[in-house]
Amino acid sequence: MAKARYVCQSCGAVTGKWAGKCDACGAWNAITEEAPREEVPLSGKKRKSSRLTKQIDFSPLSGSSQVIARQQTDMAEFDRVCGGGLVPGAAFLIGGDPGIGKSTLLLQIAGKLATKTDVAYISGEEAIDQIRLRAVRLGVEKTPVQLAAATNVRDIIETLDNENAPRVVIIDSIQTMYIDTIESAPGTVGQVRASAQELVRLAKRRNFVLFLVGHVTKEGAIAGPRVLEHMVDTVLYFEGERGHQFRILRSVKNRFGATDEIGVFEMMREGLVEVPNPSSFFLENRSEEVSGTAIFAGIEGSRPVLVEIQALVSPTSFAAPRRTVVGWDSGRLAMLIAVLEARCGLSFSGKDVYLNVAGGFKITEPGADLAVAAALISALHNETLPGDCVIYGEIGLTGEVRPVGQMDLRLKEAAKLGFKSAMMPPLPSKKSLPKTDLSVTEIKSVKQMVLKLAG
């Protein structure tokens, strides 16, 4: 009888005994007992110790290749994130918090694609009647989407492994799939890895687009082994706050397009509605006569996005002041406060600092440093910033303001939305500003911004 093994459900590390903490990834309470995996192919026959081998064929890099036509989903925001459309044979992994709208998004896409090609929607979490109820709410109940409720990967492969297979297959979700030749429960590392591997291999062989829905952990990462993200061609995260109607689809890996591209949607009763101009949505209902607010001109992928950064500085009665951040990196806020105190003589000791990115948006680029600093200075001195001014730039530990990428796109977007001025880093050598009506002020150091805002 084979000896049982213990597998970490976060990273897939295997140990001979149970432990409370995984030595490989540091996760707590993630190690569970699994039966040893028996190397059995999907045909059910035992693998032989030796098999026939053959040499592989190499092709020159300079050879001609066929131009691959992308499949448009007729949902422009989704096509943008995918790099311009769906590539045949590509595997997509979509992750997000429970209830954020992953199944809603994929069912809407399935309804649009089904009018042009064959689409199969296979659910391991819902019955067919439950999917039909959602389809009625979304208005896609008349589209010819093929529905199935199944969790056995061998049955799915037996159904799809033919020349008449659908051109788009949606699996909701990969954590519910299992292979009956592996003695472990669905959702474990072994099952998720093996199920995804077989489904992706089938998609490449039959040249259909595969969508895999992935659950996420409480930290926000896709549950299961990290190798799952390496198997697929594109990894998409569906983000958003439950209190906000906006949903952001972000590409973190894409073999056929740019990474960090975003698509913006608005969650409505009838489903997800595209937001073609997210800057105007993020800036609506803002007040220009309140201190502690600054407009940041950011870049997400190839798209310029203008968002409002809000800061609040208030006295505290506690020994350790609070530093609360929503939508930005808390470690970067601590660094920025230290720079303002050390290089500019400002004092945030004895004061709580709250920072929020309006609209539920999450900023990942360092170009927001200057806008955050401006919002903090404005909140500290209770001075209102100009409402028609956009700000961007990266701040170093010495207090200098450094250039950021794609400055021309940021200024053009600001001018298009009616802004009149901009605070930005000095231009690099041999570069010139685009022709706009903006009044541009170059900020060389954060101390210069403090002096400018003070008078």
Image (tube, helix red, strand yellow):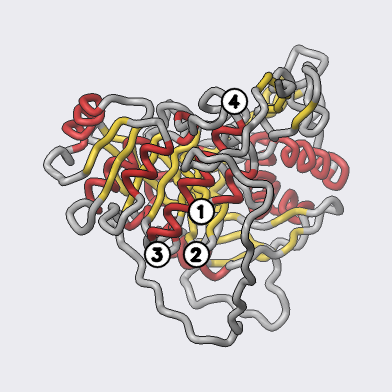
Label 4's element?
A: loop
* Residue assigned mark 1: 234
- On the question of residue 239 being in view, the answer is no
Q: Are marks 2 and 3 in contact (CB under 8 Å)?
A: no
Residue at (22, 35) in percent of width and height: 270
* Residue assigned mark 4: 218
Residue 15 locus on image (x, y percent): 79, 27
Q: Which amino acid type is shown beneath numbered disc 4? A: Lys
Q: Are marks 1 and 2 in contact (CB under 8 Å)?
A: yes
Q: Which amino acid type is shown beneath numbered disc 2? A: Phe
Spatial CA span between label 3 and label 4:
32 Å
**Nearer the observer, 202 or 373:** 202
Looking at this rendering, what residue extends furthest in the left direction?
142
Residue at (35, 51) in percent of width and height: 161
Q: Quadrant of residue 129?
A: top left
* Residue assigned mark 2: 256
* Residue assigned mark 3: 84
- On the question of residue 229 being in view, the answer is yes
Q: Which amino acid type is shown beneath numbered disc 3? A: Gly
Disc nearer the start of the sequence (1/3): 3
Horizontal placement of 85 versus 259: left or right?
A: left
